[in-house]
Amino acid sequence: MKTINKYIIALFLFWLSTFAWSEDVSIHLKWYHKFQFAGYYAAIKQGYFKEEGYNVTLVEGGPDNSHVHQLMNHFSQYAVVGSESLNALALDSPIVIVASFFQHTPEVLMTLKSNNIKNISQLKGKNIMLADASISGQMRAMLAKSGVTTNLYKSSAYDGDVQKLIDGSVLAMYGYISNEPYQLQQLGYEVDIFSPRDSGLNFYGDNLATTKTELENNPKRLSSIRRAVIRGWNYAIEYPEEMIDYILQLKTNNPLPFDKNHQLYEAKETIKLIDANLFPIGHSSPDRWAAMLDTFNDVTGNQAVFSEGTIYNEFHRDTTWIQRLLYSSLIAIAVILALYLWNRTLRIRLKQAVNNLQKVAFEDPLTGMKNRSAMIVHIEDCRNRNKDDRYIAILDICALQHINRTMGFIKADLLIRNIANSISDCEFKNSQSYSLYGGKFAIIAQATKQEDFTKKINRLIKLIAESNDHVSLHSGAIKLNLTLDNSALTTRVELALQYAKETNDPYLVYFSKSFSEDAEARNALLEEVKQGINKQQFIAYYQPKIEYKSGRVSGIEALARWDHPKKGILGPGVFLPEVERDAELMLQFERHLIEHILSNANTIIDYFSENPGFRISINLSSIKFNQANLTSELLGVCKLHNVKPKYIEFELTESSMLANLDAAIKTSNELQSAGFHVALDDFGTGYSSLAYIQNLPVNIIKLDYSFVKKIPDDVRSSYVVEHIISLAHKLGLTIVAEGVEKKRQLDYLGDLNVDLIQGFYFHKPMDIERLLKLPMIETDF
Ligand code: C2E
Ligand code: CA
Ligand code: CA
């Protein structure tokens, strides 16, 4: 009996050891060490792979080292692959996409700014350097969408040499947004970039991939590696500079290693491609892959068919593994019973091992709470038992990124743990709470009435705030509608959360159908705006500013209008607020509009040349105002159209200047040193204290319409206006009154010596044709 006992103990210890010791795994990178793979280095550096029980080696890629082959030949179990893997994803492919990290395509077509290519269709008949169509086909699809089909241009074989663009042997070339544009910038060339995104194409960039063999044989390892890399990317986008320092000390085979500045550039672009604010890190949609494959087939004439299992399904796989786990637990329990007769200690240790296993599968390591997989299992359970009197709420810590940045990662983690404790401590009847990634929590609870659930969650949020230094949370909820699949359920509750965030609602917000309609309408509008930019539908209207004492048109303000093909001329209120929520698009929009305004500037300036000091004002959003290299870009556009900066004035709102005062002062000084004028727009709406304008380097103040509207009848507004005007004059600033509609307002402001008047009293904004017929001087007042 004793020998049998020893034998069993030895076997059992061996089994346990498979959990205690790290297994070796290798991941093949797509290219030389650089920020493109920062999430993987972070998972090593922060010990995320180790915590999962794996010893991971990252194999550096390069031109002679095909990562897809490495994977197929099982040299590495995992590899980073881009959209070029599309041809390898067809039916019966051995490849599985485990997670997609770059939600947007990094592929772009570049041309030198000096080539003056405004539109892809201008590339017809020209020489373009493109990668082989099998590299994804996206570029060719983009060209084809603008009517530039393969037979309409010459294509040079791709060698990545930017010199060919410089010496003119090709007019445009293929590249990566994070690389070649930087190289060209360093060589002193400005580039125009055409992204497939502008043509409605958007392939995934880098993905983590493995083989079907790995999926079949090692599902647990797969979800561990996936989880660790997701955590790695979370870390890397939070601490890019720290990761760059780490990458710079790695041994590399790259003959021309990226320097720190290049890495910083790449980090900035990479973080945009990951777009963690919009997409859960690692999210990969089979539908999107199928659409990509369609585009690919169209271009290459291939017949590749997408097989469903090719995209790893986190939840589906997790549950099969759970089933296996449950089976093995059952067997283990049977074994325990048998062993119980032999050895009591052995029974306890085995039970511990099973518990540990369950823990790894269903527990969030940071908080010790149940994790997302456990939540999905719970929802499945409700589905199986037809329990539809359940509600699900998601709670999200406000501005966690900001907290991470200001308090540091460790303190932020501590905060997440404390909140987790508060939630766990007050679990109410028939409720279950979960910790999801990135400071998000979920609660599923039974309730007969929606109000009951609402009350409980709102009370919980209040309690969390009280016991955690007034931290605020946003929350969204939905009734557990069992006719919806898990993905539709989670999307809806996330939409409710997003609405709560957007409206900054501190209370629980329930999903409403209008949210998904709103989201769809918003996306459709943004899509239409993108097309509108390409089709040059955005133009400027101009509104004159009249000098009160002489009646002269002393300047004009350019105001954006959308010359919509179906709806006619639309004001900025219809589209600008939505566009501003997408910083990237807003920059693109403003670049386009400024370009448009400056291309007409000389004609306007010539027309008004008799009026001394005549200027064109252009509005800058805070996004544009905070853009790096703003002044040099603006000078570049002026130079291109031969416009002198002294004729241009930029209007900045109070709130965009005050958001970061030091930076605003610096940029404003730069603009003035370059010869531009700077005006403070909407003055009086932001901060009531007048004193701070002394510190702002501006030449002009625009008194906001909200005051002008109320004078002279409203005593308070009149008092404020008088003071602003007198202070501005003491500081030697020019003052413009906006929104003057009535004679009484005009007279009142004139008596106070306002310098310039802008408003419907004189003119509404008008198109350039009408502007160029205007008299130089207004006499009618
Ligand atoms: P803003 O810069 O304060 O522009 C003045 C707005 O007041 C314009 O509205 C103008 O049409 C309107 N306005 C002028 N006089 C009167 C008046 O007597 N009565 C009334 N009721 N309104 C008057 P618009 O064109 O709709 O523009 C709205 C805002 O959109 C602008 O406010 C500006 O913040 C933004 N915007 C317009 N064009 C651009 C642009 O090209 N870039 C950026 N970043 N923002 C722009
Ligand atoms: Ca303005
Ligand atoms: Ca204004």
Image (cartoon, rainbow, N blue to C red):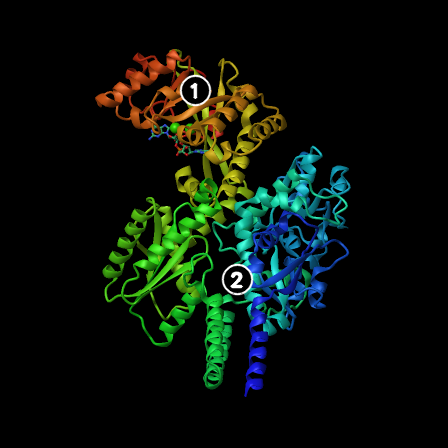
- Judge the density around disc 2: few (<14), some (14-19), many (≥20) Cα neighbours within 10 Å: some
Q: Which residue is mark 2?
A: 285
Residue 342, relative to residue 484: is it above or below? below
Q: Residue at x 52, y 38 (%)?
A: 587
Gap between marks 2 and 1 measured at Cα: 51 Å
Q: Position of residue 497 (x, y in %)?
A: 37, 53
Q: Position of residue 130 (x, y in %)?
A: 71, 50
Q: Is residue 56 visible?
A: yes
In the picture, measured across the screen, residue 448 lies left or right of residue 415, that is left
Q: Position of residue 628 (x, y in %)?
A: 56, 33
**Whereabouts is ligand 2, in terms of quadrant?**
top left
Q: Which residue is mark 1?
A: 695
What amino acid is at disc 1? Asn
- Comparing 251 with 482, the one in front is 251
Look at the image and tell me in which quarter the C terminus lies. Answer: top left
- Comparing 113 with 310, the one in front is 310
Residue 2, relative to residue 61: is it above or below? below
What amino acid is at disc 2? Ser
Q: Of marks 2 and 1, which one's residue comes earlier in the chain? A: 2
- Quick one: SS at disc 2? loop
